[in-house]
Image (cartoon, rainbow, N blue to C red):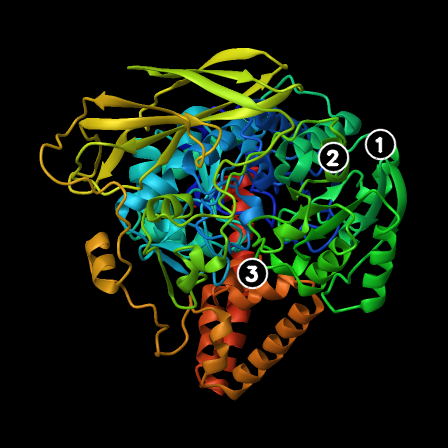
Amino acid sequence: MIDIPTALAELTLIEKAALLSGHDVWRTRAIPRLGVPRIWMSDGPHGLRKQLGDTDHLGLGQSERATCFPTAATIANTWDEPLAERIGTALGAEAAAQGVHVLLGPGLNIKRSPLGGRNFEYFSEDPELSGRLAAAYVRGIQSQGVAATPKHFAVNSQELRRMVSDSVVDERTLRELYLTAFEIVVRESAPWAIMSSYNLVNGMYAHESAHLLTTILRGEWGFDGAVISDWGGGNDAVTAVAAGGTIEMPSPGFDSVRAIVAAVENDTLDVSALDARVTEVLLLIERVTAEYERTATDDASHHALAREAAAAGAVLLRNENGVLPLAAGTRVALIGDFARTPRYQGAGSSAVNPTRLSTLEGSISETALTLTGFAPGFTRDGRPDSALQQEAVALARSADVVVLALGLPESFESEGIDRLHLTLPEAQLSTLEAVSATGTPVIVILSGGGAVETPWLGSTSALLHGYLGGQAGAEGLWDVITGAAEPGGRLAETLPVRLGDDPTTERFPSQGRTAEYREGLFARYRFHDSAGVAPAFGFGFGLGYTTFAYSDLTIDDDGVECVIRNTGARAGSDVVQFYVRRSSSSLVSRPRTELKGFTKVHLLPGEERRVRIPFTDRTFRHFDTTTGTWQVESGTFEILVGPNLGNLPLRAEYDVVGTVSATEGVNTSSSVPSRDDHSFETLLGRPVPSAEWDSAPLGYNTPMNQLGRAKSGLARAAFGILERRRRRAEASGTPDLNLLFLYNAPFRIIDKMSGGLATRRLTRGVLTLVNGQTFRGLGQIVGAFVSGRRAEKRTRIQFEQAAAGSETSRSR
């Protein structure tokens, strides 16, 4: 155990500053003389990604083998908190077994747009569902003595230029929609760390925002852990320390250390802020190095858990004439490249090297179905191939049913890029149409991390959206198809009829300097329901193999109760979902209907159960921007309960005695706001900032994809090479993650992610060069490199001598 007060008193200034940035890509710095060890951090949200190399933050190289569980988008469809906690426990156990102290997940940002390239890594478009499932993960992970790190805090909604994009959002929307999930996690599971996001929020980098990190996170929610920057997300180390940013990762060498020391010595950084951050680091280290009775890791049991979760998260969207489940002996034609080469996880820093990997083709032999053959049906890159299609058609005619595996190619969704559309490749849809024309029933199995347009639905007899099911996803899907498992999935996001139905379509992803959240609170299902725009499949929807009846709704001051009965012939599960809607007049504009609670219920045939969903302090509240406080508006609310947003059979009114009156005004509960400039300025309470990139010279936080407008011909030539490589990678269908990172990153990563090879001064020299002063810039670069190497060596020696206990160093 670390005696934190004693350690804080004995640490030198340079030691304190050094504890606030990484030793290398994955580890913190140690202070041997005080018994402060290095701790190891590692991705990821749905499986451990401990890199074998110590300089690979994107997962381009090999990592240790670990169980690849379904992604968060898949688990969200389960609406199952106990299952999420079991997965968290398994993640924590595997991390502990591999010597990892801090697991960088779960991800819980709100899916603002269906085009979000990282939506597969996040839970839901709703904060109640996201927050409660993430809290379950955190409880499980930390039960093993490993710190969970919910991310990315906050308002991180797009991948394009994610390191420089400014999320411009009004305070009420920020609080009610984008921060509530994090609030739930902090209050209900007490995470030991949180990861800040790359982006700015209302003009301030998230890792430097005192409003986010001190006022809200620590002051209002009571968070006592460490705030860790996303890798390369540090900007100004001194500002971050003052605002509440604890650890800058990966490693900027000792450049940030020198800046912090200088700021304390010249009284521009209060030493109390530095001591607060150091205390957070020491507390984190103490927590993750304490003795724990940990769960033994077992590849077989974790694979079985991954299989169970994949089945539970698959959503049955269509089942005409009860074609599913398939009976034993059914002759199946298996078609689709995804059946042989599955998409089971997303690309980027969360990619896991699985302990094993099942495929639909390889695991059908474990069922009682009869495989008549396999045909790829289409090319993965989308090029038309009539021979493959004809082979698929011939195979379809030989079977009782076709199981057709379709999906989003790897290049369509990844960390670092946002999606361009919601359509499947034409080659896949052409094969679907051709196979459907044979008259053989077609069961489509869909793989992908999010929403897909389904105008082709009529060509299917059944549609099962498996999302990204992890290493055992294929086995879980066969369990659902054969009825060995009940389809338990219910959509955690809205699937629109067309992309244009989403309110963010025209502005997502933002191409400019700012990302304007003009839709306010009316995102995803809140917009569809309030504006009367019918989705293809609504929030909370999902079919099963049995039926349920809801009855006997009662309400008291603590919550709602109802009876749910399994009216079918099979055991099954349903999610009882509880929504609220304002009935009486209101001075507060709000979405028409909002989720406020849920519980998953498993019932035998004919079994009924009375379930209770409690009210929380979030049930009726709204954030009042005038007073900067949470309020409850007195009046009448409608309580709605049922299996999904589009089917809420139980309804009753409930009078709420709140903290503020609504004696005047009109009912504005379902009025969708205009998104014009004036309306958005009114919502913000200030002028809308310019979205244009500065025409001035390129700067420290200008993204490198702006090199094309540099004054230096050399810089423009370098950009041309970068752009050509990006386009080639895009055309190949395989995203180049390293290239995408560089393309969207600001110039500051030159020093922030160099491990000490470069300094901020050197980056300024690069900027001098790209802004047209070639020879002066080259001179600055050379001078900065030489002086920087000397400064790094000097600071490193000072720190190492102090940390080892050198009296000479400690007396300085």
The answer to whether the residues at label 2 and label 1 have Cβ atoms under 8 Å apart is yes
Q: Nearer the viewer, mark 3 or mark 1?
A: 1
| Left/right of residue 569 with respect to residue 282 in the rendered view | right
Asked if 709 appears above or below 590 in the picture, the reply is: below
| Percent x, y of residue 206 | 39, 50
Q: Which residue is mark 1?
A: 367
Indicate the amino acid at tag 2: Ile
How far is disc 3 from disc 1 in space, using C-alphas? 38 Å
The quarter holding residue 73 reads top right
* N-terminal label among 2 and 1: 1
Identify which amino acid the numbered label 1 is placed on. Answer: Thr
579 and 787: which is toward the camera = 579
Look at 87% across and 50% down and name the residue there.
Answer: 374
In percent of width and height, residue 750 lies at 53, 65
Residue 52 can be seen in this image: yes
Mark 2 highlights which residue?
A: 481
Comparing 694 with 631, the one in front is 631
Q: Position of residue 626 (x, y in %)?
A: 15, 42
For label 3, the SS is loop
User: Residue drawn at (59%, 59%), measured in percent from left and top?
Assistant: 423
The answer to whether marks 2 and 3 mark residues whose Cβ atoms lie closer than 8 Å is no
Using the numbered discs, state the Cα–Cα distance from disc 2 to disc 1 in whole angstroms.
Answer: 10 Å
